[in-house]
Image (cartoon, helix red, strand yellow):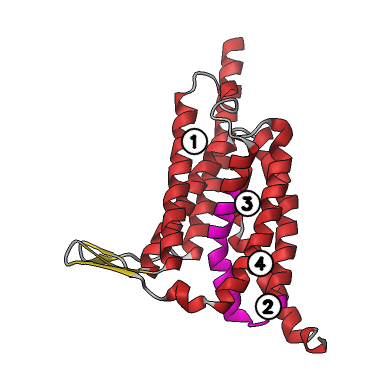
Amino acid sequence: MEALFTLENLLTFFMLLLLQAVLGFDNLLYISIESKRVTPEKQAFVRRMGIGVAIGLRLVLLFVVLRAVQYFQDPFWEIHWTGVIEGSFNVHALIVLIGGAFIMYTALKEIMHMLSVEGIEHTEGNARRSVGAALFWIVLMNLIFSFDSILSAMALTEVFLVMAAAIIVSGIMMVVLSDYVAEFLKQNRMYEVLGLFILFIVGILLLSEGGHLSHLALFGYPIEPMAKSTFYFVIGVMVLVDIVQSRYRKKLMAQRKAELKH
């Protein structure tokens, strides 16, 4: 037990905590958007319970992956249609691919719903989900997002308790931050569209990563993973453009009001 509390383990813990925070951004955004589909009085409960259950399952997943990592990495199905599609799929790659496709579908569906409604005030009242359904999707997507963080953690340390502590602490941080993110989106409805497009890019990120993990090649061109630096750069540009556009829109509206007065 004394060997557990070493400087090396302490530094590794903080590195894992930082890693969980960075990789958890997209997960946090999904949780905030998904929780809005239940009744308002249940939204905070869904976020906290969903993250809480996901933490427990993430610890179970960590234990399973540590014991059977080769089964997640060994290919179980291959396709060789020369010149059209080639790939070698393992469990990890398949989960990431399915998760990416589902996130892209969710983002597109919400965007199309925003465009189809007659009034903005009706956007939250439509397509309600039960608490159980919302919890199911939050927990499921949390586990999909967990694979990268768990496999990255295994590259930094082999001490289960250090990884487990980082998962628990990051989960508690996520519970707190999810309320702030959800409240921000509620108070600033204009950023909902930005959040959905970020979620769409997250889906592209996961699809590219899953394609790379499965050595997927389409029409002779291998799928390359999107670099995390590229992902965050794109997100930064999108946020900056949205802020500039919002301020410019406010100036135009003020100018038009001034012109109408004269």
Under circle 3, the secondary element is: helix
Residue at figure coordinates x 70%, y 31% from the top left? 40
Quadrant of res 98: bottom left
Q: What residue type is labelled 3?
A: Leu
Measured Cα–Cα span from mark 2 to mark 4: 9 Å
Density class for disc 4 (Cα within 10 Å; few <14, some 14-19, many ≥20) is some
Under circle 2, the secondary element is: helix
Please tell me which of labels 1 and 2 falls first in the chain. 1
Measured Cα–Cα span from mark 1 to mark 4: 31 Å
Instruction: State the extent of the magenta-drawn residues as a range.
Output: 138-161
Please tell me which of labels 2 and 3 falls first in the chain. 3
Per the rendering, the mark at residue 110 is 1
Point out the frontmost of discs 1 and 2.
2
Under circle 4, the secondary element is: helix
Per the rendering, the mark at residue 59 is 4
Answer whether residue 1 is magenta in the image: no
Q: Are marks 4 and 3 in contact (CB under 8 Å)?
A: no
> Which quadrant holds the N terminus?
bottom right
Residue 139 in the image: x percent, y percent? 60, 52
Measured Cα–Cα span from mark 1 to mark 3: 17 Å
Q: Name the residue under label 3.
A: 28
**Numbered disc total:** 4
